[in-house]
Amino acid sequence: MTGRQEERRPPPRSTALHDRLRLHVLTDRALARGRSTAEVVTAALAGGATVVQLRDKERTGAALVRVGHHLRALTRAHGGLLIVNDRVDVALAIDADGAHVGQDDLPAREARRLLGPDRLLGVSAQTVEEAVRAAGEGANYIGFGPVFPTATKGDAGPPRGLEDLRRACRAVTVPIVAIGGITSDNVGDVLVAGAAGVAVIAAVVTAPDMAAATRTLREAIRDACRAAGAAGA
Ligand code: TZP
Ligand code: MG
């Protein structure tokens, strides 16, 4: 094998959880061009998103539970996972598959204790050290990034790049989900770096045809996994 081929050969492990974490679409009402959260999620699931994350920092708890129940029904009908950003209480209230917390949210250990052993806990990490700590505190997956520049999250911090992503993937055994500026053009590189999956906002939520945009990402992921000989893309 040449050096170039070696470089292209990705390490993604093909386990049931890795496969289910391939493509997260995060909701964002500000970017959705007036389309409802349910419309965004319906399109994302139709296009092949494997995970939907309800991410809404403005809605009240009552409103999150209302929309959350609707998303729960949609994700069940499509066999997709439903994760709630920030709000472990809402995740439990709507019987979501899990919750995702950042470094300034409920600490991972507390989130794990509240969620119990069977729901998924995702934790955001910007550095390899944060990823290692989160894995030790009970995260089922790590959201690592921003990998690339992003305008979607003002306080996301500097882009970490593919090399840091690669280091994070080597440093932990739980799946890494790459986030930040991911598009169908760079998703292959992200998987080659070792990510189990990707999480996107703008690439889907701002698209005129959200289902088509999701499908394009899904196909790029499938191509990258096929090239790697990994099953289950
Ligand atoms: N966390 C790190 S970057 C980011 C989040 C929530 C935003 C990702 O959005 P986009 O539009 O896919 O870059
Ligand atoms: Mg958060």
Image (cartoon, rainbow, N blue to C red):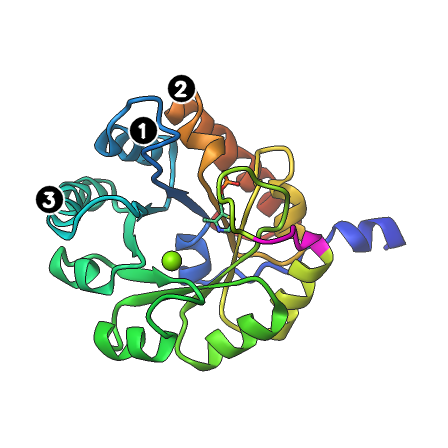
Q: Position of residue 70 (x, y in %)?
A: 14, 41
Secondary-structure class at tag 3? helix
Q: Does residue 208 sit above or below 75 in this rendering?
A: above
Quick one: label 2, few (<14), some, or many (20+) residues within 10 Å?
some
Q: Amino acid at mark 3?
A: Arg
CB within 8 Å, label 2 to label 3? no
Q: Which residue is mark 2?
A: 209
Quick one: label 1, few (<14), some, or many (20+) residues within 10 Å?
many
* Left or right of 160 on screen, residue 52: left
Of the two numbered discs 2 and 1 on the same chain, state the one appearing first in sequence: 1
**Cβ of mark 1 under 8 A from ligand 1:** no
**Cβ of mark 2 under 8 A from ligand 1:** no
Q: Position of residue 46 (x, y in %)?
A: 32, 31
Q: Is residue 161 magenta?
A: yes
Q: Does residue 172 sit above or below 208 in this rendering?
A: below
Q: Position of residue 205 (x, y in %)?
A: 40, 30
Please tell me which residue lies in front, 48 or 24.
Answer: 24
* Left or right of 100 on screen, residue 158: right
CB within 8 Å, label 2 to label 1? yes
Residue at 19% over, 39% down = 74
Q: Which residue is mark 3?
A: 66
Q: Is residue 75 magenta?
A: no
Residue lying furthest right: 2
Q: Judge whether residue 214 can be spotted in this image.
A: no
Residue 141 in which image quadrant = bottom left
Q: Which mark is residue 43?
A: 1
Q: In this picture, which residue range is highlighted in magenta?
A: 157-162
Residue 10 in which image quadrant = bottom right
